[in-house]
């Protein structure tokens, strides 16, 4: 039988949805009152409002106390009163926002302070070493207790009474967990490993970044990787690892490739993988459980909670020592299962978004949307960012489904990151998803002008090059014989040349240029769908065009791990739980595609050496970036450097074309995906092969003339 309950939906309003209870009232308020047991206080009902045949609302003259045992009396009937929609009101956020209060288990050598925010709870206890201790209720819904003793490494959990039910709840601020998230563990971080000289790699400006996206397990799980701790944090910390044939793998390979940042798919505690038997399942990590705890399946000692902390630190330090910065992929938009989340268990209904009718918002598509705009949700997110910066010394954050989050939270994250001595990279998915938050408040690409320090994945760039992501046979410039040629000036100039542009990202300092990431088909698998009649040789050349354009465009380039050797997931479009055979980096394939890897390395080296490939202002780009006349549908442009000029041409067809360079002189063939006997061009005439992308370089001299701006031929 359904429990009869009166719900606090406003600070002076109770709601009852029960035909039987409603019939008791009959608009007769003589014996109707609210009783506060602890204070022996009676609240009288001012008004009864009929909402529908089964629902009434009761208005009180006084505010209803929260976090107290309350009962509604109607004659002989006693009905418990619990908070509901009240937790989502502005009043609640104003009165219970404890944004300056440290939360979690803060451990020292002689005592640990346990603090938890649970304003609607009537009791909170901590269970530690089989003993139960009652926490003290303070202002703004904070419960707190200091326990003497050395509790470092000890498991703990809370027993919380909310809405008349006692539940065992883990601490959402847990920094360590027992295997498979059974219990939180107290940690004194002064007794975790403190890396020596763990200095973050420095970068002059974030526009110099070249990002490489990588999954911890994918990176080294292949037996050909030569890594001892395959699929683990420590596996990515090993240096000098090689295949049986002597080709570099793992971290050493990343160093050789030349990318400045490695972006790691979520490293925090996530669901679906048994941490004690990780080989039995696979997950990308977008099923978050505990946001401040390292994932146990990536640890060589998953049953030792402190070990995984030390291993994550060791991995980050090792990557730093190779001169590579670390970006963490963070998932602040949803939780794995709402009902099992400590957020929902501690303060039901607060941490998640709801529609006005009381139904859950599901813009994320996974059943729940975290309400980042609420004060204590925002505090948790900011506290997590602060913790990962200060304790793990990470260098950036990639925000999964960032468009579900609110602008104010992202602005405060940016403000916090600006306090660091080194530059922190912030980027995210700015998709506008149907969450229960007004569009004007979302951190979407459309609102990028309010988030100047944050970069956005440029889906316009992606779809223009390879076709609409959601239409599997759709083509773009590189696989459609030059389709969307008219967009190329905009794409390669980082939106500085804005000819009839409909894209939302218009600042060169905010665009993340990419054609492939962990989501959806790899570029190789996509080309097999869009161009089934071509042979592998032709598809490889198309693939090279897409990667080449990504690395030569203004903005920050983003490369998916293995993209440089035509990574395939055997056609799997959504491999989030598909296992190692689909997802792992194939280090044998790395051996076989040395030529293309060398091509990508050459592009990366070129980009890093010459600042004209990574300009930071629209004005400078407009001065230095000029479109060149070229036969349709070849796209050509020149970059005017201080000492060198570059002319870049891209041919997305199977035909060969003659070219006239922008000026006469000695042009060096700096980079091309086509082997050529001629390294230099003397004069101004040359040619471009089928599916070729080529960079010509010429040293500047005083007689060099200005290059005329010519828009591309009719598309």
Image (cartoon, rainbow, N blue to C red):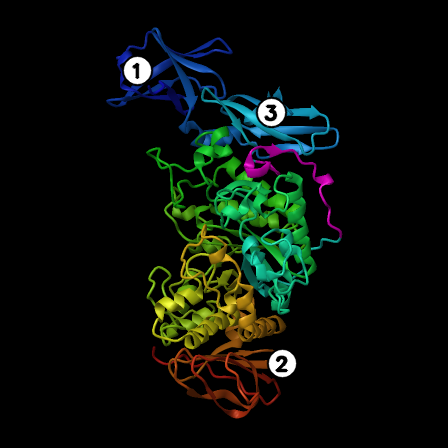
Tell me where residue 300 appears, x and y as whole percent. Answer: 63, 47
Q: Quadrant of the C terminus?
A: bottom left
Query: Which numbered disc, 1 or 2, marks the residue closer to the eye?
Result: 1
Tag shown at residue 126: 3
Kindly identify which residue carries mark 1.
21
Residue 179 colored in magenta in the image: yes
Question: Is 243 above or below relative to 288?
Answer: below
Could you say whether the residue bearing mark 1 is in a helix, strand or loop? Answer: helix
Does the residue at mark 3 contact the one at mark 1 (Cβ under 8 Å)?
no
Kindly identify which residue carries mark 2.
643
If you read the primary sequence from the N terminus, does the residue marked by circle 1 or circle 2 appear first?
A: 1
The span picked out in magenta is 173-196
Query: Which numbered disc, 3 or 1, marks the residue closer to the eye?
Result: 3
**Quick check: 110 left or right of 127?**
right
If you read the primary sequence from the N terminus, does the residue marked by circle 2 or circle 3 appear first?
A: 3
Q: CA distance from mark 1 to mark 2?
A: 84 Å
């Amino acid at each position: 039988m359904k429990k009869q309950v009166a719900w606090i939906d406003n600070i002076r309003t109770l709601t009852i949805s029960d035909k039987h209870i409603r019939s008791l009232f009959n608009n007769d308020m003589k014996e109707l009152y609210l009783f506060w047991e602890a204070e022996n206080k009676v609240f009288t009902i001012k008004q009864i409002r009929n909402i529908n045949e089964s629902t009434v609302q009761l208005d009180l003259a006084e505010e209803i106390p929260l976090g107290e045992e309350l009962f509604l009396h109607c004659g002989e009937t006693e009905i418990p009163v619990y908070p509901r929609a009240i937790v989502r009101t502005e009043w609640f956020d104003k009165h219970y926002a404890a944004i300056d209060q440290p939360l979690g288990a803060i451990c020292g050598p002689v005592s640990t302070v346990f603090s938890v925010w649970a304003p609607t709870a009537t009791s909170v206890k901590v269970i530690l070493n089989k003993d139960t201790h009652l926490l003290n209720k303070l202002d703004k819904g904070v419960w707190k207790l200091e326990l003497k003793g050395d509790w470092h490494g000890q498991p703990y959990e809370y027993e919380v009474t909310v809405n008349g039910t006692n539940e065992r709840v883990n601490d959402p601020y847990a920094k360590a967990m027992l295997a498979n998230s059974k219990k939180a563990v107290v940690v004194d971080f002064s007794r975790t490993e403190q890396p020596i000289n763990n200095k973050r790699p420095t970068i002059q400006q974030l526009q110099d970044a070249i990002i490489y996206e990588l999954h911890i397990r994918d990176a080294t799980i292949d037996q050909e990787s030569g890594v001892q701790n395959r699929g683990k944090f420590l596996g990515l910390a090993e240096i000098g690892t090689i295949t049986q044939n002597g080709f570099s793998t793992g971290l050493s390979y990343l160093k050789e490739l030349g990318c400045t940042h490695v972006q790691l798919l979520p490293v925090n505690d996530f669901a679906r993988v048994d941490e004690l038997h990780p080989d039995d399942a696979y997950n990308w990590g977008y099923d978050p459980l505990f946001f401040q705890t390292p994932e146990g399946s990536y640890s060589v000692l998953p049953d030792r909670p402190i070990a995984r902390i030390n291993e994550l630190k060791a991995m980050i330090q090792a990557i730093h020592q190779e001169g590579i910065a670390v970006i963490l992929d963070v998932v602040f938009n949803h939780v794995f299962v709402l009902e099992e989340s400590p957020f929902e268990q501690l303060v039901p209904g607060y941490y998640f978004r709801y529609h006005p009718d009381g139904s859950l918002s599901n813009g994320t598509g996974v059943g729940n949307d975290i309400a980042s705009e609420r004060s204590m949700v925002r505090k948790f997110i900011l506290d997590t960012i602060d913790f990962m910066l200060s304790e793990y010394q990470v260098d950036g954050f990639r925000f999964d489904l960032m468009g579900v989050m609110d602008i104010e939270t992202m602005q405060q994250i940016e403000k916090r990151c600006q306090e660091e001595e080194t530059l922190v990279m912030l980027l995210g998915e700015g998709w506008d998803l149907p969450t229960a938050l007004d569009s004007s408040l979302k951190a979407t690409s459309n609102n990028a002008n309010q988030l100047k320090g944050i970069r956005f994945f440029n889906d316009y760039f992606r779809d223009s090059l390879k076709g609409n992501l959601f239409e599997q046979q759709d083509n773009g410039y590189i696989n459609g014989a030059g389709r969307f040629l008219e967009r190329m000036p905009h794409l390669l100039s980082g939106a500085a040349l804005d000819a009839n542009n409909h894209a939302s990202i218009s600042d060169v300092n905010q665009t993340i240029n990419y054609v492939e990431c962990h989501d959806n088909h790899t570029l190789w698998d996509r080309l097999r769908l869009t161009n089934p009649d071509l042979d592998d040789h032709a598809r490889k050349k198309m693939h090279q065009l897409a990667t080449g354009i990504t690395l030569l465009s203004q903005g920050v380039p983003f490369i998916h791990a293995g993209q440089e050797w035509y990574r395939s997931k055997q056609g799997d479009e959504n491999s989030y739980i598909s296992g190692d055979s689909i997802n792992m980096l194939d280090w044998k394939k790395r051996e076989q595609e040395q030529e293309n890897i060398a091509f990508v390395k050459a592009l990366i080296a070129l980009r890093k050496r010459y600042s004209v490939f990574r300009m930071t202002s629209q004005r400078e780009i407009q001065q230095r970036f000029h479109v060149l006349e070229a036969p349709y549908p070849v796209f050509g442009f020149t970059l005017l450097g201080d000492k060198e000029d570059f002319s870049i041409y891209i041919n997305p067809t199977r035909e060969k074309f003659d070219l006239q360079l922008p000026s006469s002189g000695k042009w060096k063939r700096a980079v091309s995906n086509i082997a050529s006997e001629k390294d230099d061009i003397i004069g101004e005439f040359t040619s471009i092969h089928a599916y070729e992308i080529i960079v010509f370089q010429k040293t500047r001299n005083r007689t060099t003339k200005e290059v005329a701006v010519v828009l591309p031929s009719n598309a």
